[in-house]
């Protein structure tokens, strides 16, 4: 099939590359000429393990362009994979989606299926269809389908090629048949065919449930601290029950990233807009906001303020395996520490450059963990990178001025740290 994909971020580019891997002829469209030029040289604009290898392997079937007309005019399928960032009121900003829709309406010259992959509020696919039909320049038949994406950053290729499910929200046969053909190569992946609104809801309900699961375990972890239980064992004990499952029960300083924070707020907004209330989701959002500051609260009993102290920060990104800083706990905590007049030294294996763009002057960026810890009065762990997980009490004891370690990801071995001379605190243990 001849496929065009609008947007070359995590969703768009990964979709395009994986569809090419499965035999489709794919053109990726972006407005950023720089990005396109780099992708033509085989360089991925995002850090995602395995992506560049697949770009290289499928280079005959993969094309990149800023010229949307040439990509859309004779495509069988056009995927929309542009961002839907959060607006100030929590609702989803659909400007980029609608801009692509207008470009499609202006340029398509043959019957095709337009597929919304971006995460969009329930009912958006209907609006996309109306907008397309009212603005078409040429007499063609267009079907609109919803096909939400469930990939996680850092495992995006695996999550797409070996997806847990492919959800197709369709209202007509053309859309269903075309998308079955596009996904024909994904043999072992369960396929759910439903209507468009249900598909749109599946995406939000899935992400919001996972966010809720994390906020739930964080709340239980906070209670574990008070009553003297250990969240690691509690989560393990819960996880044996297949109805609960053992994944996404890892307590810490809250979820970040481009999806959970945005999608919880967007569904909550949609519910309020329709005079409904999502009490569970509201609670998940509130708990997460408080959880992000949990380490800072713990630190106050050692230092009521950080004036003149050296603070070491290990990990800046919202999770390991990505250079993405969106909604990362580091972004909430570090400005407060800086306001306190501390000297901040930070290490992150891939997130440093992005962080430096936001905080160019105030932070000393270190090339190694040892350099970061040297002479520090306290250490905050915000991301569980493998290099951080591998640290032993000795690593802190030999380098830090005062070995106070606050582990926001429960990634260090509790027994060995607790029995060492390190002053060690984590979440719910
Ligand atoms: C998520 C979903 O997993 C994915 O299906 C969806 O399509 C997009 O949103 P992503 O944001 O890339 O993916 O990362 P994920 O691995 O889910 O982690 C999100 C956040 O939750 C991270 O900050 C992570 O640290 C946190 N988290 C995750 C926990 O705090 N505890 C857990 O048990 C799991």
Image: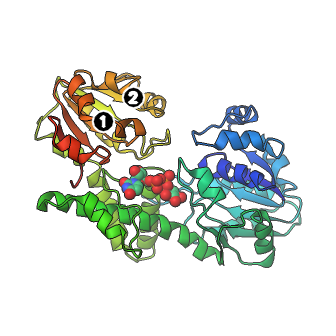
Q: Quadrant of residue 312 in the image? A: top left
Point 26% across, 61% down: residue: 233
User: Distance of mark 1 from mark 2, alpha carbons?
Assistant: 10 Å
Is residue 109 visible to the viewer in this orientation of the structure?
A: yes
Check if mark 1's residue and mark 2's residue have beta carbons within 8 Å.
yes
In the displayed structure, would residue 166 be above or below residue 322?
A: below
- Where does residue 266 sit, x and y in percent of width and height? 46, 63
Q: Which mark is residue 334?
A: 1
Q: Earlier in the sequence, mark 1 or mark 2?
A: 1
- Where does residue 415 sit, x and y in percent of width and height? 21, 47
Q: Which mark is residue 150?
A: none
Q: Secondary structure at mark 2?
A: loop
From the viewer's perspective, is 193 left or right of 242? right
Say which residue label 2 marks.
Answer: 359
Dividing the image into four equal quarters, which quarter contains ligand 1? bottom left
From the viewer's perspective, is 221 left or right of 41? left
Closer to the camera, 83 or 181?
A: 181
Closer to the camera, 366 or 185?
A: 185
Q: Secondary structure at mark 1?
A: helix
The crowd level at tag 2 (other Cα within 10 Å; few <14, some 14-19, many 20+) is: some
The crowd level at tag 1 (other Cα within 10 Å; few <14, some 14-19, many 20+) is: many
In the displayed structure, would residue 90 be above or below residue 62?
A: below
């Amino acid at each position: 099939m001849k496929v065009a994909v609008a947007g070359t971020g995590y969703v768009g580019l990964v979709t395009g590359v994986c569809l090419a891997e499965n035999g489709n002829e794919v053109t990726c469209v972006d407005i950023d000429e720089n990005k396109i030029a780099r992708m033509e040289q085989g360089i991925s604009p995002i850090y995602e393990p395995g992506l560049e290898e697949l770009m290289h392997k499928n280079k005959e079937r993969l094309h990149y362009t800023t010229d949307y007309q040439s990509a859309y005019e004779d495509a069988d399928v056009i995927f929309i994979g542009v961002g839907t960032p959060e607006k100030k009121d929590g609702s989803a900003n659909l400007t980029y989606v609608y801009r692509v829709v207008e470009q499609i309406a202006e340029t398509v010259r043959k019957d095709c299926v337009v597929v919304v992959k971006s995460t969009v509020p329930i009912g958006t696919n209907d609006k996309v269809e109306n907008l397309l039909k009212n603005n078409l320049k040429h007499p063609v038949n267009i079907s609109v389908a919803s096909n939400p994406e469930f990939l996680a950053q850092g495992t995006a290729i695996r999550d797409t090629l070996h997806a847990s499910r492919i959800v197709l929200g369709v209202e007509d046969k053309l859309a269903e048949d075309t998308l079955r053909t596009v996904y024909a190569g994904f043999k072992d992946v369960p396929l759910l065919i439903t209507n468009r609104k249900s598909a749109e809801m599946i995406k939000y309900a899935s992400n919001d449930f996972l966010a809720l699961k994390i906020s739930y375990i964080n709340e239980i972890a906070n209670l574990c601290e008070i009553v003297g239980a250990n969240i690691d064992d509690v989560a393990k004990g819960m996880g044996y029950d297949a109805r609960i499952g053992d994944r996404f029960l890892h307590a810490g300083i809250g979820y970040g990233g481009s999806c959970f924070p945005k999608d919880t707020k967007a569904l909550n907004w949609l519910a309020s807009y329709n005079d409904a209330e999502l009490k569970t989701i509201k609670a998940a959002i509130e708990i997460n906001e408080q959880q992000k500051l949990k380490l800072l609260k713990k630190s106050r009993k050692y230092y009521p303020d950080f004036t003149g102290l050296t603070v070491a920060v290990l990990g800046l990104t919202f999770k390991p395996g990505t250079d993405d800083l969106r909604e990362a706990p580091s972004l909430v905590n570090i400005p407060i520490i800086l306001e306190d007049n501390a000297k901040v030294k930070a290490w992150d294996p891939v997130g440093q450059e992005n962080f430096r763009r936001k905080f160019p002057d105030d932070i000393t960026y270190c090339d190694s963990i040892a350099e970061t810890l040297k002479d520090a009065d306290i250490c905050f762990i915000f991301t569980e990178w493998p290099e951080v997980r591998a640290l032993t009490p000795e690593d802190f004891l030999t380098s830090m001025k005062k070995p106070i370690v606050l582990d926001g990801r429960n990634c260090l071995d509790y027994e060995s740290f607790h029995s060492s001379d390190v002053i060690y605190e984590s979440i719910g243990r």
